[in-house]
Image (spheres, rainbow, N blue to C red):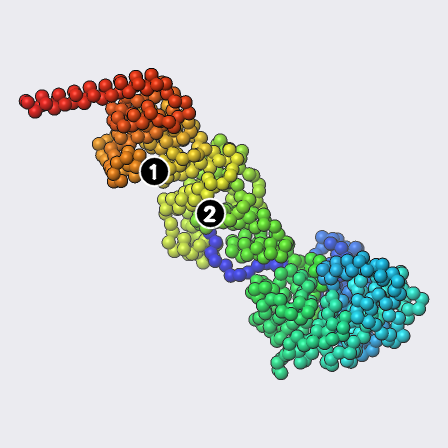
Amino acid sequence: MAKPHSRTRTVLEPLSHSDLSNHLPTLGPFRSLALFSVSDSQTLIYLGTQSGTLLLLSTNPANSDASDPNLSLLRAVSVGDCPVESVQVFGGIAKVLVLSGGYLFLVDSVLSQPLKRLSFLKGVSVFTRRLRSREAESSNSSENVANSTELSSSSTSQRFLQKLGGGIRANGLKIKEPEQHNEGSNAFAVVVAKKLILIEIVSGGSSRASKNDQDSDGLNVSYVILKEIQCIDGILSMVWLNDSVIVGTADGYSLISCLTGQIGVIFSLPDISNPPRIKLLSRGWNVLLLVDNVGVIVNEHGQPVAGSIVFRRGLDSIGEVSLYVAVVRDGKMDLYHKKSGTCVQTVTFGGEAVGGPCIVADEEDGNGKLFVVATPTKVICYRKLTPEEQIKDLLRKKNFKEAISLVEELECEGEMTKDMLSFVHAQVGFFLLFDLRFEEAVDHFLQSETMQPSEIFPFVMRDPNRWSLLVPRNRYWGLHPPPAPLEDVVDEGLMAIQRAIFLRKAGVETQVDDDFLLNPPNRADLLESAIKSIIRYLEVSHEKELTPSVKEGVDTLLMYLYRALNRVHDMEKLASSANSCVVEELETLLDDSGHLRTLAFLYASRGMSSKALSIWRILARNYSSGLWKDAALENDLRDTSNHILSGKETAAAEASKILEESSDEELVLQHLGWVADINQVFAVDILTSEKRAIQLRPDFVLQEFWFSFAAASSSSSSSSSSSSSSNVS
């Protein structure tokens, strides 16, 4: 019995933390943060400090218990006296690139060797690693295969230039083409004054690393300048995605083509605004551009691809978590949906005063399971919940609308199948059923394409029964009670409402609907609503293609529920049409309740003509003299459209329909007499009917004509004589 919830999800949950204030009190606040997943169980965390120190932490160091959730500090190395402004990890070659004091430094991923300064670069203001979408990698792989013959005649130093649009030499470094595999994955871009330089780190073991390459160092790598581009001044932030570099200045955002070197303005910033911020969104391979507290998502060509996101407060740092963007400020982290812009989760860092700006980091390749936040003194790791975990959490909170919305979003993203959407719809339906919201429950059942009608059977008929083995077991996550008859569901729900009313008076909040608390329903109304809703579901199921056994269950239980509400018209309609009702399950029930007409229709539809005719004969003898109206029969009797039939004629008419199709002369002989006594037209129709598969013998027909009409004439004469004698008297 869930009450409405705000749009909230649990996307991140705290996993581990480390307080470094006591260990390294002179470090100053953290300035930069980066992650690298070594394996599914270990993630390395790099922290650059204001004092120029680079820290390495691990979530699961090899010398510790893997079950220990706390972080461990592995190493701390000094980069220099200037702040460590940026850290980028090149996982493919296990190297880390650090920006501090206008210089770039390279070090191995575990900080076991001394840092090496890139001596050919000085005055670097900003740098970024190149990231490539899967589509771009696939495209280039195809091009390489298609052009292999043509390129084989070219020198290796020219191949990459053909892709990048020409090349130059700078600082005496040789210009080469990256390898076909993972081409450009170890490339980065730096800004020096008004120059954008594209560089690749080449491993010493690579076939491309020659003796002529300069700036080869003790880390067994070489640096290859791919291209230099004259660009704009004052670049403060930058992202390199595929063949485009998007930069931000105090004036606005621009796009630089790596192929042509052309620069185009994406949009300008207001005269008074915060410094530009750019965040690569690896999920979808887009880029988020910030204008104060508004984020605009563009593709690699600078074209907007989604609506803007309005953040409700300023921000210190920004990261990406699956479908969401995470921003931090003042000790709080908000997660916003990238498409809707809705804030879905707010996380507070322990509820304490942070005392300075915070930074966040995610793995830009999108494969990591961790999300890290660094306050001035602490490092906090959050685990990204899987989609299934998020859905389960929403279901436990009874935030059903949000659960369905999440699954639909994941289906659109290709992360979940349509079957999972059906699965969740069915599960939500069961939750609502036990919350006494029967109509809504059936709405969700009907939206589930995988739910089986047999899953409803235990709510109608107690186990064990004829269909118990057809009911799927353990198909869901076990978040709701097991199936039970509707009477039990209603009784348990009413008890829950009474408990909630008591707790509410004691000041305890519950998940029971306020409507139920303010106006507690009565048992009869709830039970009627439940039965009507289940009838609606079974009526839809009745029209579907089902296995014979399931079809029998659907039709039989549908009749069972019609009878519970005394819906005589629906009972007779189902019984007289094509159905799969199990007669043995219903005949005693209908007989005891006096629904003989329904039973007669049911016998007839299931081919039990003799039993059906016996009931119509009994009804013809015992009908009261009251009159009733049946438009269908009126048409059959070729009378006026408003002809009123007596109960006896109704019984005779229904018997006539059965006998007109029967080729059993004995059965016809058994019932023709009483039908003729009521209406001779029916008797003629029976004897002359062409509806039967095997026609009656002519001598039989003539004989029955004679006896039937002779008997009818004799009966008529007797009635006339009696009437005359009465008049004479």
Which residue is outermost to the front?
698
Which residue sits at x=37%, y=31%?
601
In this rendering, the label closer to the viewer, 2 or 1: 1
Q: Amino acid at mark 1?
A: Val
Q: Position of residue 198 (x, y in %)?
A: 80, 71
Q: Amino acid at mark 2?
A: Val
Disc 2: CA contacts within 10 A as few (<14), some (14-19) or many (>=20): many
Tag 2 and tag 1, C-beta contact below 8 Å: no
From where the camera sits, is residue 113 visible?
Answer: no
Report which residue position mark 1 lands on.
568
Q: Position of residue 372 (x, y in %)?
A: 69, 63
Camera-side residue: 198 or 344? 198
Q: Quadrant of the C terminus?
A: top left
Dot placed on the residue nearer the N-terminal end, 2 or 1: 2
How many marks do you count on the picture?
A: 2
Which residue sits at x=32%, y=23%?
687
Which residue sits at x=62%, y=83%?
271
Report which residue position mark 2 lands on.
442
| The quadrant where residue 197 appears | bottom right
Which residue is outermost to the right?
211
Q: Is residue 486 above or below residue 664?
A: below
In the figure, is residue 628 to the left or right of 184?
A: left
Which residue is outermost to the left?
729
Element under label 1?
A: helix
In the figure, is residue 648 to the left or right of 528?
A: left
Which residue sits at x=27%, y=28%?
681
